[in-house]
Image: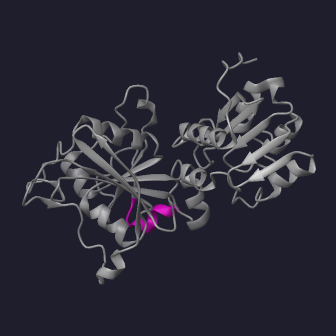
Amino acid sequence: MTPPLPHAPLIDDARAMAVAIALSQRGAGRTERNPNVGCVIVADGQVVGRGWTQPGGRPHAEAMALAQADERARGATAYVTLEPCAHLSERGPRCADLLIAAGLARVVIATGDPDPRTNGQGAAMLRAAGIGVETGLLGDAARAAMAGYFTRAALGRPHVTLKIAVSLDGCIAMADGTSRWITGPEARAHAHVERARADAILVGRGTLEADAPRLDVRIAGLADRAPRPLLLSRSARGLPAGWLHADSPQAVAALDLPGDRLLVEGGAGAASAFLAADMVDRLLIYRAPILIGGGRPALGDIGLTDLARAHGRWRLDDRRTLGVDSVEVYVAEGRG
């Protein structure tokens, strides 16, 4: 049995769900096509169990939290970021059954599961067993934390984050293509954390040939989380071993990616192509306090024909300072 957790301060519903959402991020980029769920079990105002979906998708977050809580789960409340699964699988038990068997008094669910095998049925199973069920608490935040899973369900493609590192005057490189390094070490470390949360990472032909990028994660303790590299190019000529190839942004949807979080990182051409295809769900814009002048612009033509159409498409989600640099995070309206 797992040793009991040390006593924590009393915790209310909103704080408990926020903890579950934070825990779910530990599985980002590691759960393959399964949602990265978080779960917290609270008894008498104390956290007695925590869990998140493990690498490859099993065990599920609820199973992990229940194993830690053990007998303390009886009469407790579980906070779970996604509706507990209700479909049978050879890979493990249904989470709804596990929660019922544990004797929970209440389950708080952030958001429903779009999978038709569970959608509504997990909550119905819990209610039929006499367990109090509440839904919707911090649902937007939970869906954002599981963006890959929900984007695949809604749009049939991976969730796409576009990363751009620019100077104050909007350049991504010198005129001769030199781009190391526009940003400082703190911003680069932040970008590597983003890589660790992605399942695949894409660059264009120009970036591949100019930089021969490694596309790995160079942060101590996270080196094993390198995403699968992917080349966007009309041709697969010179494709490095282990890389995937797509001849258009739309072709990415049909690829056998290891999961549903794609980071587009390299080249104005690749960035412009995904924006023109309206396939960017999240923007990461790193800004360095430098002026280049006459350098290479961050974007080419993205198909905009009317300036009015450029407005209202992006919502600022976060802004922070990273050493001397800054990062702004935007989400596409209607998708975040």
Tell me where residue 293 appears, x and y as whole percent: 7, 58
Question: What residue sits 43% from the left and 26% below the top?
Answer: 221
Q: Give the farthest residue toward the bottom.
A: 306
Question: What residue sits 82% from the left and 42% below the top?
Answer: 106
| Residue 41 visible, this angle | yes
Compared with 65, 93 (above or below) is: below
| Residue 60 visible, this angle | no
Position of the N terminus, as image quadrant, is: top right
Name the magenta segment's main secondary structure.
helix
Tell me where residue 308 appears, x and y as whole percent: 33, 81
Tell me where residue 319 appears, x and y as whole percent: 36, 50
Tell me where residue 86 appears, x and y as whole percent: 81, 50
Q: Nearer the viewer, residue 286 or 257?
A: 286
Compared with 248, 97 (above or below) is: above
- In the rendered structure, the answer to whether residue 92 lies left or right of residue 271 reads right
Compared with 36, 204 (above or below) is: below
Q: Nearer the viewer, residue 20 or 188?
A: 20
Compared with 19, 289 (above or below) is: below
Per the rendered image, the range of residues in magenta is 246-254
Q: Quadrant of residue 183?
A: top left
- In the rendered structure, the answer to whether residue 7 lies left or right of residue 177 reads right
Q: Quadrant of residue 12?
A: top right
